[in-house]
Image: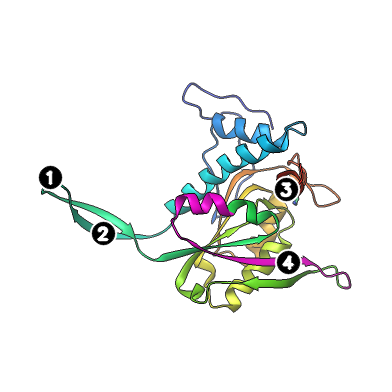
Amino acid sequence: MASTSSANGAVAAQTGPTLPPNASRLPQTAQLDALLTIIRDASTPRSDFIFYSDRIIRLLVEEGLNHLPTVPQTVMTPTGFSYSGVSFQGRICGVSILRAGEAMEAGLRECCRSVRIGKILIQRDEETAKPKLFYAKLPEDIAERWVLLLDPMLATGGSAIKAIEVLIENGVKAEQILFLNLIASPEGLANMYSKFPQVKVISAWVDERLDEKSYIIPGLGDYGDRYYSG
Ligand code: URA
């Protein structure tokens, strides 16, 4: 989608679709658009794809952390004065949806020291054609944590819905889940929100639609292939 930017970097023409109440996009700045333009470009080499998508992931994680609750905290500074600030209220963990979600783990670790990260593998069941859980390894105390769910592309929403079901079966409340992705489709958002309206979704960008093979259009192709195999 074409866009023009003003001197302060705000993107003017990128209006995008109306989002469900708990869905949001990163600030649609010219910088973000430029980063996305690089990773969307089919001629971008793998090393650049990794570098620039890592930059977007970092922005997503920083924005995700803005959505976590804080409590007042007062500290003494070296000047001998007190400062009334805040600290995060609860603990967090990441859960990546394999394989592409693993690419987002480093960005989370850069922002959150020693963060626990679980993994979920979901694939299409050959018989039913529905998403099926193949593997899950989650922190044992996940029910007491805020969960940053990581998957770069929200296409049909099938894997995300299955992953959220697994988290809920493990005691996580839907409102404790923040789903971070680089590009979402309107269809995937609608599908996910029809089941889990309380989950917060943060996307860098929301694209136009899915094609008949469930690729996001204009999208960037297969994220896992581009990140892991070039
Ligand atoms: N997964 C991807 O990697 N790309 C898409 O366009 C859709 C799903």
In this rendering, the label closer to the viewer, 2 or 4: 4
Which residue is at a point 64% across and 56% down the rendered structure image?
Answer: 102
Label 1, secondary structure: give it.
loop
Label 4 residue SS: strand
> Considering only vertical position in the picture, is 58 above or below 72?
above
What residue is pinned by disc 4? 122
Residue designated by label 2: 72
Within 10 Å of the Cα at label 4, are there few (<14), some (14-19), or many (20+) other Cα atoms? many
Residue on which disc 1 sits = 79
- Please state the extent of the stretch shown in magenta in the rendering: 105-127
- What amino acid is at disc 4? Ile
Q: CA distance from mark 3 to mark 4?
A: 18 Å
Q: Are discs 2 and 4 less than 8 Å apart at CB?
A: no
| Gap in angstroms between the C-alphas marked 2 and 4 | 40 Å
Relative to 121, 174 lies left or right:
left
Q: Nearer the viewer, mark 2 or mark 3?
A: 3
